Amino acid sequence: MSWEGLYSLLNLSAVFGWLLLIAAPRHWRLLGLVPRYVVPGAIAVVYSGLMAAHYAQSGGGYGSLEAVRRLMAHDPVLLAGWAHFLAFDLVVGVLLAERMDRVGVGRVLQAPALIATFLFGPIGWLLGLATEAGARWRGRLVAEA
């Protein structure tokens, strides 16, 4: 498989995981294992294989911006970096969804934070925390009334 083909497969896997996280009923526990473990786990295996096979050949590293530039200039390591984002953003999305579930945030209100986490990582995480905080604050106001 080409690097582009693997890139497409990783993206499709991640989208599938995100769609399940956003749209599937949470009470279907077995289905919940897919975005929680199956998809990020499979992507992590690909990441691990790419890094094990290609990191040393890249001539790069993490010691400076220039070293990271050399590292990411090597297509298999760049693809591994993308896999890293896909896996970790989905894990963060699962954790955010659970937090928002616990405070009673409905799926429709969770969706913007989860989509932002998929597309923009830290921005979505911040939005998810703000959504959770708003639900907690609203709950306190209701409880005090």
Image (cartoon, rainbow, N blue to C red):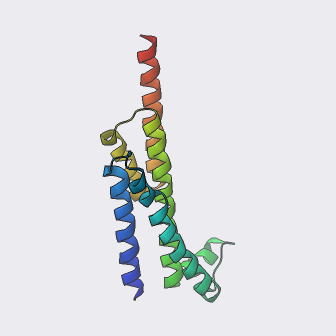
Q: Quadrant of residue 39?
A: bottom left
- Residue 125 position, x and y percent, is 48, 48
Question: Disc count in the image?
Answer: 0
Residue 19 in picture, x, y percent from top left: 33, 57
Identify the residue shown where x is 49% and y is 61%: 37
Quadrant of the image containing the C terminus: top left
Taking depth in this image into account, of 109 and 38 the one nearest to the observer is 38
Q: Is residue 52 above or below residue 94?
A: below
Image vertical order of residue 14 relative to residue 27, above or below: below
Q: In percent of the image, x 63 and y 81: which residue is there?
A: 60
The image position of residue 27, as x and y in percent, is 38, 45
In the visual, does 70 lie left or right of 113?
A: right
Image quarter in which the N terminus is found: bottom left
Measured as percent of width and height from the top left, residue 13 is found at: 38, 69
Looking at the picture, tell me which residue is in the foreground, 66 or 31: 31
Q: Is residue 73 above or below residue 125?
A: below
User: In the orientation shown, which residue stands out farthest toward the right?
Assistant: 63
Tell me which residue sits at (38%, 56%) in the image.
31
Residue that appears at 42% across and 36% down: 131
